[in-house]
Amino acid sequence: MNKIIRIFTLLLPYLWGSFKVRIATLLTLFLIGIDIVAATFFPYIWKNIIAADIKPTTASWFLGMTLLLFVCWTIKKTAPHFREIVFFTVTNQAIKSIRLRTILKSHTISFLNLEKYNVQEIISATTRVSQSIRQFMRVSFISIFPSISKVISLSIALALTDAICFGIISAAYCSLIVSAFCLRYYSQAKIKAWHLTDNVTVAVAHSLHTTSSARFNLSAETKHLSHLFDLEATAWEKHNVALYTLHLAQDFIFYIGSGIVFSIVMIDYAHGIIKLDKLVLIYGLISSMYSPLLEITRNMTRFFGGIIDLNKTLDILNLPSENKHIQLQNIHPQPIQLDNVSFGYPEKKPLLHNINLTINPGDRIGIFGPSGVGKSTLCHILTGLISPTAGTATYGQTDLYQIQSESLGQVLCYIPQDHTHRELETHEHEHGLELKKKAFSGGEHQRYLINRALEKKPQIIILDETTNALDRKSVDQFIYAILQTVPTVIMITHRQTTLRKMNRFFELKNGHLNEVHQE
């Protein structure tokens, strides 16, 4: 229930966000209203036609009732489609806004919180969220609400028609209760199925990114992927069984209950207790009742499916943003100071121990060490992305972690090691903008990142294994360009030979940073 409240809290404001959206919402409510009226009065029109005495009734009356019958019929059949068209304005606005909010939120939450999520999971969540929002808003606002209203309206009509119709009403509500009970198992099955689908997506992405090594051991890779696909297929099979079992249970209860009651009504008709017009009315109300009942169950499965799909997006949106309230007022070069800095990730052994480092304006710092010793973590502390678990990291007299990242970006540029060699090129298209992917090699991607950084002419640049995909000549060219453009350079690599042009050298080993004097 708490998740449902959170989702409605997220989506309700989008029903009234702008003038265009407000008009769409009001028009949708109007269409829902006339749909409910048409569905309720449709059986009564049939009743009046059947009950009318042909001799005293004029042809114009029959023509009028027939036209009214077909107007109601047309409204019943077309109103849902008009609702979909009108309401898309609302859902489209919500989708655009929430997707953008999710991505921007990923850039403002704590870096440690973000690391709990696989990037592929976030991409998958923001991709699925479009369909999930559309489905959730469509189901909850323009499907379930009118269907429930129809069931209530038709229940009242049945109750007023004859006391025996309470049996039909009871069958209808019992079928809904059983369906609601089955929804629990359906939801659990869908959660597991989507979890396995996310795992398969991550595994496939990894397999494709590592194709250069995977193809030398393709049998093992095939076995691993086949196992994951089998688990996913089994999970979705259980999901489908739960879904259709739910519908079978509802149909069985409603039709058995309604069939028993209608059989009693037929016996009464055969004995002359009730007239043909009432028989037709009861049958019409039963027929009208089933459609919204089916819609409620069908849409409740989509409703809970939407909740499951929106969970990850909600988790991200509800993470607290970093409380970085300091903006740099002085953009003149300042020293970076680490005093007795230590760091360890939660539930893991400490990675950095009592590190002391002063980086003055104009320094060219080279830091080297083997993989896995915490070089990237040290970069994250130097850039204020994470806060040390002990000690202080400052820029001038200001705590690095308290400075807004965009403000710090006025003086500092950080190029992390990146294994994704893709860049989106924007091209004009006759219908707007088309984003076309262009594949880069590792070296091309690193050249692009360095060139883009140098265009900003930062005061400080931090390079984390940025040149490891470049050849020796290219490395020398870029280091020369960097040293000519940027006053303060911090270069981190596992290859000590890359640091020849630096003037201070440090080795990171076993969590300790020690200065090394080069001859």
Image (cartoon, rainbow, N blue to C red):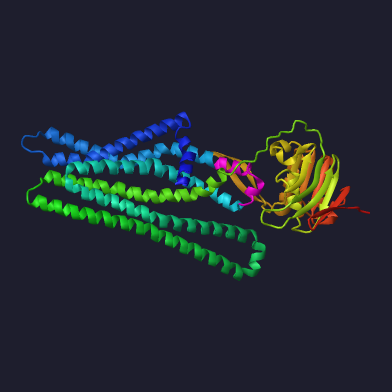
- The answer to whether residue 349 is left or right of residue 242 is right
Residue found at the very far left of the displayed protein: 55
Q: Is residue 346 left or right of residue 197?
A: right
Q: In which quarter of the image is the C terminus?
A: bottom right
Q: Position of residue 156 (x, y in %)?
A: 24, 41
- Let me know if residue 478 appears in the view: no
Give the magenta range: 99-116
Where does the image place residue 25, in percent across and percent down from the top left? 41, 34
Q: Which residue lies furthest to the top in this view?
A: 19
Farthest-out residue, bottom? 219
Magenta stretch prevailing secondary structure: helix
In the image, is residue 48 part of the stretch drawn in magenta?
Answer: no
Q: In this view, does 345 lie to the left or right of 340?
A: left
Asked if one can make out residue 95 in the rendered structure from this viewpoint, the answer is: yes
Task: Tell me how many marks there are.
Answer: 0
Q: Can you tell which quarter of the image residue 67 is in?
A: top left
Asked if residue 104 lies in the magenta stretch, the reply is: yes
- Most extreme residue toward the right is 519
- x and y percent of residue 334 in the render? 81, 37
Q: Which residue is drawn at 29% across and 39% down?
A: 36
453 or 29: nearer the viewer: 29
Residue drawn at x 46%, y 41% is 8
Q: In which quarter of the image is residue 198?
A: bottom right
| For residue 9, side relative to residue 144 (left or right) | right
Q: Which residue is drawn at 38% across and 41% down?
A: 142
Q: Measured from the top left, where is residue 123 in percent x and y?
A: 57, 49
Measuring 41% from the left and 33% from the top, which residue is drawn there?
24
Task: Choose between 215 and 339: the one closer to the eye.
Answer: 339
